[in-house]
Amino acid sequence: MEGRCGEGSHTQSPSCAAVRSRKPCMDTGKHREKASSKKTEPRRATRPSSSDTRGLNGTSTEKRLRYSDCDYTPLCPLLSVAALSLCTRFYRITEPPHVCWDETHFGKMGSYYINRTFFFDVHPPLGKMLIGLAGYLTGYDGTFPFIKPGDKYEHHNYWGMRGFCAVLGSCLPPFAFLVVLELSHSTPAALITASLLIFDTGYITLSQYILLDPILMFFIMGAVLSMVKFNHQRLRPFSWSWWLWLLLTGVNLSGSLGVKFVGLFNILLVGINTAWDLWRLLGDLHLSLVDFMKHLIARMFGLIMLPLFLYTTIFAVHFVILNRSGPGDGFFSSAFQSRLIGNNLHNATMPEYLAYGSIITLKNLRIAGGYLHSHWHLYPEGVGAHQQQVTAYLHKDYNNLWLVKRPNSDDFTWNPELIRHGDIIRLEHKETTRNLHSHLHEAPLTKKHLQVTGYGINGTGDPNDLWQVEVCGGKKGDPVKVLRSKVRLLHRSTGCVLYSSGKTLPKWGWEQVEVTCSPYLKETPNSQWNIEDHVNPKLPNISLHVLKPSFLEILLESHIVMIRGNSGLKPKDNEINSKPWHWPINYQVIWWLNLFSLGLFVVMVSLCCVALQRGAKLGGTKKAHCQVLMEGGGLLFLGWLLHYLPFYTMGRILYYHHYFPAMLFSSMLTGLTLDTFLQNADLLFSPAVSKYILRGGQIVLLVGILHSFYLFHPLSYGMNGPLAHDPTSSMAGLRWLDSWEF
Amino acid sequence: MQGVKLPVTVKCEINVLLIAVTVLGLLTRLYGIHIPASVVFDEVYYGQFVSLYMKRVFFIDESGPPLGHMILALGGYLGDFDGNFVWNRIGAEYTSNVPVWTLRLIPALCGSLCVPLGYLLVVELGYSHFTALGASLLLLMENSLIVQSRFMLLDSVLIFFLLLAVVSYLRFHKAPKSSLWKWLWLFLSGTSCAFAVGVKYMGLFTYLLLLGLAAVHTWHVIGDKTLCNVKHLNTIVVVRFLVLVVMPALLYLGFFYVHLILLYRSGPHDQMMSSAFQASLEGGLSRITQGQPLEVAFGSQVTLRSASSKPLPCWLHSHKANYPIRYENGRGSSHQQQVTCYPFKDVNNWWIIKDPSRQSLVVSSPPRPVRHGDIIQLLHGMTSRFLNTHDVAAPMSPHSQEVTGYIDFNVSMPAQNLWRVDITNRESDRDVWKTILSEVQLIHVNTSAVLKLSGASLPDWGFRQLEVVGDKIYKGYQQSGVWNVEEHRYGKSHEQKERELELKSPTHDDISRNLTFMAKFIELQWKMLTVRNEESEHKYSSLPLEWITMDTNIAYWLHPSNNAQIHLIGNSVTWTLANLALFIYVLLFLTYLLRRRRKIEDIPEACWEQLVLAGVVCSGGWVVNYLPFFLMEKTLFLYHYLPALTFQILQIPVVVEHLYTHVLRSPSQHKAFGGVILAALCSVYFCYRIFSPLTYGQPELTSEELAALRWRDSWDILFRKR
């Protein structure tokens, strides 16, 4: 079998010969080889020994233990992993034939791409674009409305989108298999990982519906796999395979970031790995500085420039495709909206300067700030004065229209007179004919601000309805330009400024955004407004093509809006929200196993480190195991930390499925740790016993995983019968934790 | 070399320097601290806690652990403060009973001692006494640190303990092996870490940094192959762990212990705590509950308090009003009597526990206690309606069942008023239901719904009281579904009229109940971490980014009639120098690091290690005390930056000495650099002098002079209109 190693395509692999020449070394590990499956024998043969010090340039580099670079991937296990994962993911994929869970969002957004309607979502567009593309290619026409979970699909072609997600989802186990194989050089470890992922009902469920998670995890795993492969190419810098894996890493990084911002954690992982790699290269005195710069520039190109370029391209495509006005318009600035066909600002003409008698909408300049809005509802009792609500509302609506009036008369018969910086106006709400009003009552949420209400009947109010117009950066006598002037409205009698706090009102305020009058006169976007729609028949209209924003402006704005949207997803009452510390302990056998292995890994690595630090002399295989644990395991552990810990600092609403990327790393770590642990059983027992322990452990693991899958599979393939609360249900016995909800 | 010949003289010289800076520190911090004799800025906040300590009244302050308040209260204790002052307004004149001087003394002392500590820290980092003198002078003339030390505020105390912890750890690290002093320094370091964390949670950052440093040092010790004796090695590691981790944790508990010992009277924050906790406070709930029978029996009259205090602590309540036949949204109700949760004490909160199999509403003798698993009925005392729930949607939470006081309208809606008692904190399955101590779920027998506070409040028809529902899909342990008996007596009257009188009379008799310290500690700590005051906007709040360049200031006090005022404004020259020093340090560090990696050694190994250690302490101290604020969502002020600033200032002399000895080589460069240093120190001094009127609040400046001090447009300096 070892002949295979020499037969491969490696004219450039002298190290293989080196390995073969050290055959006696390998004899120490023979008993392990027999224990593992037959397929892995070639792999074992190339297991490095500790005395391998032939580095890149033949120097002594003890820290890095070089593995043989004559690769042989055990094809049979890999193929069976791929086949099994495809089977589990595609089994009954068209069921249930109605909208499930978040399909209502992502399916809908896929349809928007097909219909080219502009929408707003807190995630970057790539995932939804791919879903849309998959739907388009399989003949879905974008007409299904995806209104709420449970709607029947009927004649619509939804299987294409689900199938696409399932294909990406079934790539995860093979990818994980390859990653673990690369890191540990042990097929059993890789098989343990792959079976964990194949038979985990959570992954199966996530991969079967139209969701972003399988796409995201595909790119994350892709990036990790390419990174690990790239690390492995370190002895052949600038070869074509080196370039291939480098560029693939970059592509996958941009993909993962393009689906969700969680991809940032992945970028961090690759960044840390690359920095460590560069640090190693820098310390290699045989590498000239010029060569080092080459390495540096190549990585900067592959891991920074290329992903950045691809990422912007994704957005460029997004903006080109979505060129029609849709439900997302209101989140964006007036300039942005003028791009969209069907928006009232697209190719619009309107009077340039504001005058008395104009009907306008006022948009807050805070990014994703809403329109000044009022409606036929009063503030509830106990919240300031019992007068009409004034809010900021993100969507276009007739209730956003306001009429600009003189401070003392309602007479517009004469020639229109322009409003200038410093003038005093009243604003009458068009629909309800109440005036914009403020007074010395505290605002509903921001207690130090004053309440803003709609007051008066048919436009008659009191002196508290007077507002002074101030153009930011303007001086007395400047006219107010539509869309381009930043305007502040100062309340005459209290001296406060009209302000949108960005806080969401409770149910009585229809969850619109609070508007207050702030006594703090600092210039912030929250207190600045611009005039968006402007109707005044007595003034000449001008065309507004001045507004067209550049691509970079659009890109920046859409990012700020997305980030605001993300942090705005605060948990509300009665909603399913979970805390990060519940996640690792929440599911089934596999999750418990992962948690156990995390602990085991930490203990084993600490033992390894202390032993090395005390200068313990380790035998060849033991040292190799230490190496696998510290380097491979360390990388995976870091990945887990990076994908898990940041959630603790997030204020936004969190769900269980946020843990799945971290669990990928945790599962890979489990495979690696358990395998190393079982192989080192001979530290505690005699060799004969430990052989049985190794075998037995592997079998018990497999049976355990399969048994858990058998128990829980109704969850992922849809349940029949009553809910689990009902003791007669088949699921009743499975509610192992009270917090589960089936 | 001279030091070896004349050790005594040299030693004296050092002491003189140290004493000189200490004296100067005391002078600058203590000079006229009783002026102004009115409330300055956050004194209004800390003062109320000092008063409560003086009166021994219990309170919760979610802003930090109790040690800081206790230290301030110690000042009040020394000055025989009786606690009688209304802390409601910044600028209010102190009355004669407030010992202003002693109240401000302790923070001022801590602030002054920071100056010699800065000196010692730089010496311990291995730099010369000259450099150390520079460091202490910079700290001495830092206006913001002076302002913050001179009033009843906590930041100077925090900085003092932080510096003390670092200095003593460095002493420990450099001390010769296994001398007694070495372990004393370690002990001091652990103690001051605990004190720092006890003053403000912010101390945790520096504590973690110190732990990290100690971990690295210990790791080196583990790798030290000369230590062959594994037992000895284990002792070293274990002792360090005990002193730096376990002991601070114990001390932290100790602060709470003292806090709870000191505050034994009930006060304004009682309502936030559980009944058991309140019962342990003198004059609070204990006054009412003392002498109540312990065991709840059939026939007991009780009030039931919800264990959840969200949105408000409240008691199970009913009154003579029915649910409206139709709600606003058109849904129907049973039109039976409302059952709510009411946040005030009221006679309508009384319920009588009845045995379903008997008619009697009085306690038999001997009393028959209610045990876990027993079936009971609950009769509302004033209206004699049974607590009932049925399959009708609750008014505000339609997924749950409505809870009513049952009225028979003859509409085929039978009474379903049997409840099973489920004691959640029982020790055995036959546990007796105990007043205050037992946490009880009431499970409806017919539908297995759990009586629960939904968190919503009812509209006007329900008098805005809180909604109570029966939750059928109740899972696990939820505080909102748990109740405990708060007030309790054995019912004696057979007639309804008598019973109403009895209900209105106060309970009496006497027994005391004690919670263990740990139970109290856990409850208090949890409340402190979870209670959130509504985030408030403040005129002087600022963003962390504005701190580096001091784009913001805080007006602490303004004289009621003239222009004299006190501001938190730092020494601009020092702040600029500190930023510069940090920048140069990072630059130097990166250059050396990269060049060393290529085996080019510009400086000797020992010097490099010294530079790294200085960087970890100074720059590291700045980083850990500054960057976390970017993640915080609370209202932030400029004074939050002061601990970071202190460490950043200590970086200046370190960088200067390194540049002087290792980067500048020729004597002419040395001379020029010496001139620059002198000029910098002079400008620091002038800046200190110029701003000292705003630091000390005297002398009064004219409007023109004030306008000249407004170096930045973003500073808010107050002008009194004449």
Image (spheres, coloured by chain):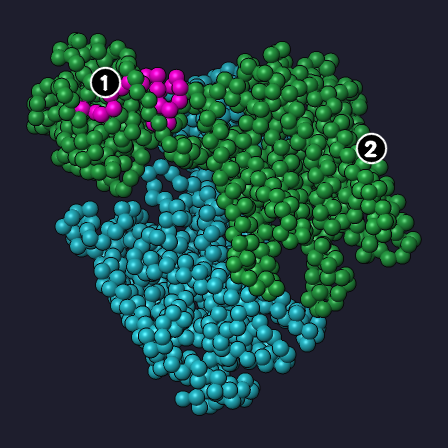
Residue B536 covered by magenta stretch: no
SS type, badge 1: strand
Look at the picture and state if B608 lies above or below A77: above
Which quarter shows the C terminus of chain B? top right
The magenta region covers B276-298
Dot in front, 2 or 1 = 1
| Residue B653, position as x, y percentages in the image | 77, 46
The residue depicted at 77 percent of the width and 18 percent of the height is B700
What is the display colour for chain B?
green
Look at the picture and state if A19 lies above or below B650: below
Residue that badge 1 annotates: B489
Q: Is B651 left or right of B545, judged from the image as shown?
A: right
Residue B285 covered by magenta stretch: yes
The residue depicted at 39 percent of the width and 73 percent of the height is A682
Q: Amino acid at mark 1?
A: Arg
Q: Is B426 left or right of A634, judged from the image as shown?
A: left
Residue that badge 2 annotates: B686
Look at the picture and state if A211 lies above or below B399: below
Look at the picture and state if B88 lies above or below B674: above
What is the display colour for chain A?
cyan
